Amino acid sequence: MLNIRSIPLKYRLPLIHGGILGLARLKSGPWRKAADSDVPTPGPVLVSGFLNESSGIARGGQLSLKGFQAAGYAPVVHDLRTAFKHFIDGKARLPDMAPGGVWYIHANSPEVMVAFLAHAPDQWADRYRIAYWAWETPKAPDYWVWTADYLHEIWVPSVFVRDGVKRAFEAANRPDLTPRLRVMPHPMFDVDQARPDRDRFGLSHDRTEFLCLFDAKSSSARKNPWAVLEAWIKAFPASCDTARLTLKVQDLRRDPDIAARLDSYMSGRDDIRFFTERLSDTDINNFMASFDALISLHRAEGFGLTLAEAMTLGVSVIATGWSGNVDFMDEASAYLIPSRLIEIKDPTGTYEPFRPFWIARDHEQVWADPDVDAAAEAIVSVTNDPELRALKADAAKARIRDVNDAWTAEALSALPFNGWLK
């Protein structure tokens, strides 16, 4: 019997996503497509997501939930993970609640299809359906277009993501779906309650402390920690006693090759260290607040949640000046690193899926190659010019407050979904 985990990820992902789409198409006969003329039954708001997990999509869902609550709504909470046990048999149950209202699913297209498959359509057909999607390249995957037909609205965290999903709609000759897109940046409601604690996290009071966050489960090609390490070594060819870089690495044991590559940069240096302790939501905010600067030389971000969180905390940010993060940062509020656009190369297949030789490469799919020399100069500036660093951090705190505007009670009450709540 074939073990799908034995298939290389680059081929496995298209198989999984293609299988989910195929099953959804097969079972979608009784599903009701969304339409502007729909008159859903008024009811409560149901928020589904991976709300008990620690990942970017989980954190985004948690912030959306807090956004609804801060605006005065009383959402019913639903763990979407349980749907994965029932997407074939369709026997999952949504929480016991009044029918109708709004079903808000904080997940991308494949997970939304799983949610629809797992729950019989009589549980959700009369609900106003919203999904929250994020993607990190200039065009979203083609198969997302099919799912959009069943959603009344699609919320996205940035203009970059909106344009990427729009391009997918247009490529499929479905521009009629574009009005369903709405930019809703992640709200920053709880982050500024964090308290720095350098002693707790082994940080020096005499060094400028830099942080780079990296999850081995995610695409290292996209997060690009290698560029951070190269920039650090350019900035400080020998081990530095006035600055230090901490790599907060999650799930490093999952990929020995990544671990070995990271180790190779640390040889003979005491100004680069790993931090692998798993932290609670409260502790991760306290941890981030304890640093002077955060570095992200990403190739692409749908939003840049950790960048926004760092800015909220008053931590200086060095970041690639391309993709979703430029919605909320500029030269006054961050050290933006220039880049050139290059063809996507992603060994995991997440952003460069397998294509048979007879299917032409999609030349719209590019991402950033940040300038390592410019990043090294920014690292030196953060280290040697604390006054400029403080000015940018203050400007960042003022700038990032604007992301909450979309989540005020007044702003949410003006949106169409509010008409189907009671």
Image (cartoon, helix red, strand yellow):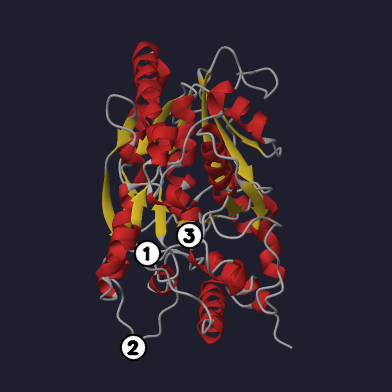
Image position, residue 175 (x, y; %): 25, 68
Count neighbours of disc 2 (C-alpha within 10 A) and say few if under 14, some if 14 to 19, many if 20 or more.
few
Check disc 3 and give the amino acid type.
Answer: Tyr
- Labels 3, 1: front one: 3
Q: Is residue 31 left or right of residue 393?
A: right
Say whether disc 2 or disc 3 marks the residue closer to the N-terminus.
Answer: 3
Q: Check residue 264 in the rendering and tell me which mark sits there, or answer none.
A: none
Circles 2 and 1: CB atoms closer than 8 Å: no
Q: Quadrant of the N terminus?
A: bottom right
| Residue 290 seen in the figure | no
Label count reads 3
Q: Secondary structure at mark 3?
A: strand
What residue is pinned by disc 1? 140
Say whether disc 3 or disc 1 marks the residue closer to the N-terminus.
Answer: 3
Q: Is residue 372 left or right of residue 23?
A: left
Q: Secondary structure at mark 2?
A: loop
Residue 6, above or below 135: below
Image position, residue 360 (x, y; %): 30, 80
Q: Which residue is depicted at the point 67% across and 68% down?
A: 84
Check disc 2 and give the amino acid type.
Answer: Trp
Image position, residue 103 (x, y; %): 54, 57
What residue is pinned by disc 2? 358
Q: Which residue is depicted at the point 57% across and 70% down?
A: 116
Q: Check residue 128 in the rendering and tell me which mark sits there, or answer none.
A: 3
Image position, residue 308 (x, y; %): 44, 34
